Amino acid sequence: MGLRGYIDNQLTKDEVVLYRAHVSWVPIIIRFLLFVIVAIVACVLIVNFQGDSQLGLRVLLIVILIGAVVQIPAIVHNLGVDIAVTNKRLHSKHGLITVQNDRESSLSRVDDTDIDFNSIFQRIFNYGSIEIHTIGSDSLIQFDKIAKPRLLKRAINEAKENYVKTSSDVVTDQALGNN
């Protein structure tokens, strides 16, 4: 089934994926680079004050290894998130091996979408949170750290607009008896 196969298997026969969104890798890369910078500073300090380049190199490698290991849960999370906009629904799934959270909402129920860039880094690297408000529900669907959230919002709005047009055409055809 693959990493992206779950949603594809949930589609109805005339449902087509129009857009796929994913979680941004920028926060993971930034955190890892911070570990690398700390490792380099520690290495330089050890070499300058202790004069032991072997110890400095070992500390450098250990801190970089710790930085990589600390990122594993975030990497697994990113790989397990699948968000798809189809011509009928908005699908999302969380979970890499087993699906922990499977949500879907008909485009007819999508009321509004809001994008939130919480920091200057999010604006610079084009990732942020998107909130999707649905009709008839107090809850909202929220996706955090989404890469290119404006494209996801545009895809939802365009799919919703086309869905409304298609639905109204079907209703008109049925009212006129043009089955």
Image: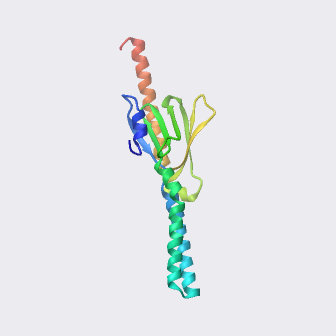
Indicate how the structure is coloured in the image. rainbow
Position above or below: 29 against 48: above
Residue 12 image point, x, y percent: 40, 29
Residue placed most toward the observer, 75 or 153: 75
Position above or below: 160 against 66: above
**Is residue 36 visible from the viewing direction of this image?**
no
Judged left or right of residue 15, residue 107 is right
Q: Using the rendered view, name the quadrant where residue 170 is placed.
A: top left
The N terminus appears in which quarter of the rendering?
top left
Residue 123 image point, x, y percent: 53, 56
Position above or below: 83 against 64: above
Rendered residue at 39%/37% (across/down): 8
Residue placed most toward the observer, 17 or 81: 81
Residue placed most toward the observer, 83 or 173: 83
Extreme-bottom residue of the structure: 51
Q: Using the rendered view, name the quadrant where residue 46 is placed.
A: bottom right
Rendered residue at 49%/73% (across/down): 61
The C terminus appears in which quarter of the rendering?
top left
Extreme-right residue of the structure: 138
Extreme-top residue of the structure: 177
Residue 164 image point, x, y percent: 46, 27
Residue placed most toward the observer, 153 or 68: 68
Rendered residue at 42%/31% (across/down): 162
Residue 85 image point, x, y percent: 44, 38
**Is residue 118 visible from the viewing direction of this image?**
yes
Rendered residue at 52%/36% (across/down): 103
Q: How many marks?
A: 0
